[in-house]
Amino acid sequence: MDKRKRDTLFTLARSGAAAVIAAVSGSERAAAQVSSSDGWVDPTQLGAIADGAAHPLSARYATLEQAQAVYPFVTRLDSEIDGCAIQAALDASTKVRLPAGKFRISDTLSVRSNTEVQGAGTETVLTWTRENPSDRFAMFRAANSSAIRLQGFSAVDTSGSAGGYVFSGVRVVNVNVEQISADRMALAMFNPSDGQTYASVSSDLASGTSNVSSDVHVTGCSATNIANSDEPRAAALFAFCVGWSVTDCKFTNTPFGVQWWGGDSDPNVNGALTNARKCADGTITNVQVSNCTAGVWGSMGSNVKIAGCNIDSASDVGIDFEGCTNSSASQNTVSNCVNGNFACFWWNVDVSIVGNTSRQSRADYPHLRVYNASQATSNRSITINGNTFITDQTIGVIDTAYGSVDTLEFSNNQLTDTRIDFSDNTLRSVTVADNRLVFTRAAADPMNAIEIGSLYGNGLGVAARNIVESKATQPPDSVALYLWSDDPASDSQFQVVDNQTSGFPIDLVTDSWSTNPTKTSYFTIQGNTFGSGVYRKEDHGARSSVSVLRSNQGISN
């Protein structure tokens, strides 16, 4: 035996692959050349053909026993030889190099700890060939393992399956999925230990009882043409994970782009504010998602940061927080999402929408909307600051028409042909301050540029230092500022301070709709500059409201 073959067998023997090599025929054994210096194994050295054509084990072995002599793990003769050779390489070494070629894979490949799989870029193509009825199956799978890296190849599903992922990690730690492009497959999903539910999941990494995936990352990847299944998939899914990220990725024609899951945000299930949010410390940066159901969204997350992303054309929502705490969306560009470019659902605490650009072209597509099946103000605090909202061809809206919120701050935003409607739901403290609203076209019907209403629980509504300007002639009865409350249990307070309005038929309308003759609304109207000179005090409730006017220009004080 020459020195190269001796070194080869010695290297494989150290890594547990001697049984595989010993069972290969003489010609195949001669082809098995593995560098003893760096330990990388090439599946073509273990029988892979990688020409894109079907090569089942039955084409090479007459019986299953003969195939198992070479690939002990196989259970069927219709398994693709390419996939078997990759699994043999994974069993033989923790360093597997996939050369340029077209590999066919029909069975999930098992990955152990400390493994690196490296392809030759887009010239390495892995094709999934076996139809799988499962909503969630994987080309590569790792469980209860750590320190794994997959990088530098393309994956495609030609089987007609609807639920495939390139990689599935079950209670894994320190996993990187990098520079992988997928067609008709999603990229990666990370889960806790098998069979875990919200109640049994422990996401406290310091407790010693944690059973979630952590330190898991998807970077520089793309995925397209992901089919809908009974359980729609995200290109990257993080279920009960701690310390996770998606960076520099592009997803098109997919049910979801990125999704996190730390429990069901329905307060009747897991979403009560006293319950832990069990998907934590995630970042989603520079991700593009287009033609999707939902772009970037999740349930029961804590410390989730979405930054620098571009979401376009979602049939549901663009960026959505459901039952999340201490989470933010900043410097993103979102457009043409049917149920809201931005959305908050159920009970959130300290969610901020900052420095984003939102663009819509239909009046019935909201820029931002609060959704909630409950009228309670347990949906605690939302901050919307420094954003740009632009509506093309019509007048758009930002509203709370479908959900309540305890504290809502809307400040320093620039709005073009976009109105604000914080009313028609239970609100407690609403501040609309330092915004500029410009209308370049006329509304089809009378509208309110800024509306704050339906305050409850000793509510406070503030409209301060806003500039509201219409460059088009608006329909009669259109109002720049409309403030009202209908709380039957307590008085409501409003402050209308230092605003500037122009181009509207009516500058200000205040109203009390309370049916309780002992409760009403109080309005402090001070330092405003009103262009049309029209203020209407309209009291439709059982008791007149109280208005105090000081130092306003354009109306009588």
Image (cartoon, helix red, strand yellow):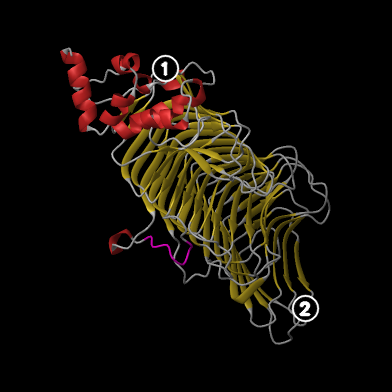
Q: Quadrant of the N terminus?
A: top left
Q: Residue pushed farthest left?
A: 3
Residue 3 occupies quadrant: top left
Closer to us: 482 or 500: 482
Judge whether 69 appears above or below 554 on screen: above
Identify residue type, mark 2.
Gly
Which residue does the numbered mark 1 point to in the structure image?
100
Where is residue 282? Give x, y as percent: 42, 49
Please tell me whether residue 200 belongs to the stretch shown in magenta: yes
Residue 526 on the magenta segment: no
Q: Residue at (38%, 63%) from the top-left corner?
A: 202
Label ID, residue 541: 2
Q: Classify mark 2: residues with Cα within 10 Å, few (<14), some (14-19) or many (20+).
A: many
Q: Is residue 41 left or right of residue 446?
A: left
Judged from the image, the secondary structure of the residue bearing numbered disc 1 is: loop
Q: Is residue 373 above or below residue 44?
A: below
Disc 2 element: loop
Q: Which residue occupies the foreground of this view, 369 or 10?
A: 10
Left-right relation of 366 to 118? right
| Residue 325 in picture, x, y percent from top left | 46, 60
The magenta region covers: 197-203
Our reading of the magenta stretch's main secondary structure is loop
